[in-house]
Image: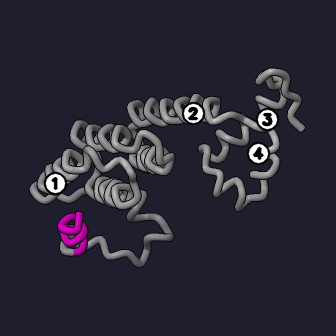
Amino acid sequence: MLRKKQNIYSESDLKEAKNIYFRYGGNKFEMERDGVYKKYNNYGITKRQEGKWKDEIFEDYKSKIEKEYDNLKLENNIHGILMLEYRTTEAINIVIDILNRRDIDTFSSILICEEIKKTLKYTHENNNCDNVKSGLYQIKNKLLNEKITIDSRYLNASFMRDYDFSECSIRNRILNI
């Protein structure tokens, strides 16, 4: 149980609560699903503290995205930052900037753009959606005018063995961005 005196948490309780919060990226639904939300909630962490932690998680993902050049790891970190549902427009703009600046294979780019579109459906930050849609449109045109490339790890992955990697199939996915 949390030992709280005038909004001061014990060091060990704060550390344990932070570990849980970071492990789940602040997602209380996932905490509940795994049966740890009640424990986390008992620590009585303030919204202000959670906001600080969410900023830390966001900045950590942002740093990883900027430094990562392995397409599969990059895609995983992009998924993480978008799933935070926090500073969503900023996160999407970071991702679009990465897609514009980096030489990322076509298939990874498609997956990332699809993730952005899915995130856009659920974001409450609609004020900059036109800017994001414009960015996606530019990436779509870039992909349509470039030679299709696919990271060999997708081609060799057992879970993708039945996937149609034909040019026609890839182009259709690009058109749906």
Residue found at the far front of this picture: 6
Circle 2 residue: 51
Circle 4 residue: 41
Q: Which quadrant of the structure image shows residue 141?
A: bottom left
Amino acid type indicated by mark 3: Glu
Q: Callout 2: 10 Å neighbours few (<14), some, many (20+)?
A: few
Rendered location of residue 164, percent (x, y): 32, 76
Viewer-side label of 3, 4? 4
Q: Earlier in the sequence, mark 2 or mark 1?
A: 2
Rendered location of residue 35, percent (x, y): 78, 58
Q: Earlier in the sequence, mark 2 or mark 3?
A: 3
Rendered location of residue 120, percent (x, y): 34, 56
Residue found at the far left of this picture: 145
Q: CA distance from mark 3 to mark 4?
A: 12 Å
Q: Quadrant of the C terminus?
A: bottom left
| Pointer 3 with pointer 4, Cβ within 8 A | no
Write the residue at 60% across / 44% down.
25
The answer to whether residue 68 of the structure is visible from this angle is yes
Q: CA distance from mark 2 to mark 3?
A: 17 Å
Q: Earlier in the sequence, mark 3 or mark 4?
A: 3
Q: Callout 3: 10 Å neighbours few (<14), some, many (20+)?
A: some
Q: Callout 4: 10 Å neighbours few (<14), some, many (20+)?
A: some
Q: Which residues are magenta?
A: 169-177
**Relative horizontal placement of residue 132, taking residue 122 as reference (left or right):** left
Circle 1 residue: 137
Q: CA distance from mark 1 to mark 4?
A: 42 Å
Q: CA distance from mark 2 to mark 4?
A: 15 Å
Q: Secondary structure at mark 3?
A: helix
Q: CA distance from mark 3 to mark 1?
A: 44 Å
Determine if the magenta segment contains residue 171.
yes
